Image (cartoon, grey):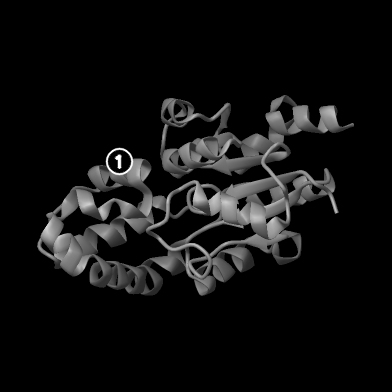
Amino acid sequence: MPDKAIIFEVDGTLVDTHVLRARAWQEALARYGRQVRLPRILAQMARNGDRFLSVFLPEDEYERYAEELASFHRALFHEEYLPRVRAFAGATELLVHLREQGWMIALASTADPDELEHYIELLGVEELIDASTTDAEVDHTRLNEEIPAEAIRLLGLDGTDDTLTIAGLPYDVEGSVRLGMRSIGLVCGGYSDEDLRSAGALAVFGTPADLLTRYSESPLAVDADVDG
């Protein structure tokens, strides 16, 4: 088995979920008396991941309602928004190409197992995935670097030297960099080139299809040349 790996964040990287997930948060917050504009929710998701609720709720309400609100959000997302999720252009083809180039592939996520299974079926890549994390392994309160760290552990790798992450959320890029990994950003998740580079991405592309088209100029090809 190869000892070089790509760890993909899933939301906003392989599947188009960021705005849909934010709309579900907007509805959930409204149910608890908080009217929040969608751009503000997206901005806080970029900075704080799934721990962003503390920004919108006073400390006492956060302690009292955060878990209940998160459960409501999850049920709402699954019922109303999950069926609307679509894969980004070129996502499946990129994964196939990476496998052909000898990369191990892991999916880093805090989605529940059923949700991640839905995305894998949507992409049609079950046989290409060597490891994946869900909320069974990493919960929503853990630090962003702990999610790719768990993916590395599941892959059986000793460190991060031969591992890259691909992510569409600045928060996830920051976590990977903090762990000592190199990261590639994709703007298809809704965040800008500047957002992702400021978070530490060493290169930024549009969609998975764009990364595949420009593969020869990406850090992925550079690594392949070094290994060869």
Q: Residue at x 63, y 35 (%)?
A: 210
Q: Residue furthest right?
A: 228
x%, y% of residue 112? 48, 70
Question: Is 86 positioned to the left or the right of 224 in the image?
Answer: left
Residue 14 appearing in the image: no
Front residue of 87 and 64: 64
x%, y% of residue 57? 15, 55
Q: Which residue is identified by label 1?
A: 43
Image quarter (top left, top right, bottom left or bottom right) of the N terminus: bottom right
Q: Residue at x 53, y 66 (%)?
A: 137
Q: Residue furthest front?
A: 158
Report helix, strand or loop for mark 1.
Answer: helix
Image quarter (top left, top right, bottom left or bottom right) of the C terminus: top right
Residue 127 appearing in the image: yes
x%, y% of residue 24? 30, 62
Question: Is 135 positioned to the left or the right of 35 in the image?
Answer: right
Above or below 33: residue 202? above
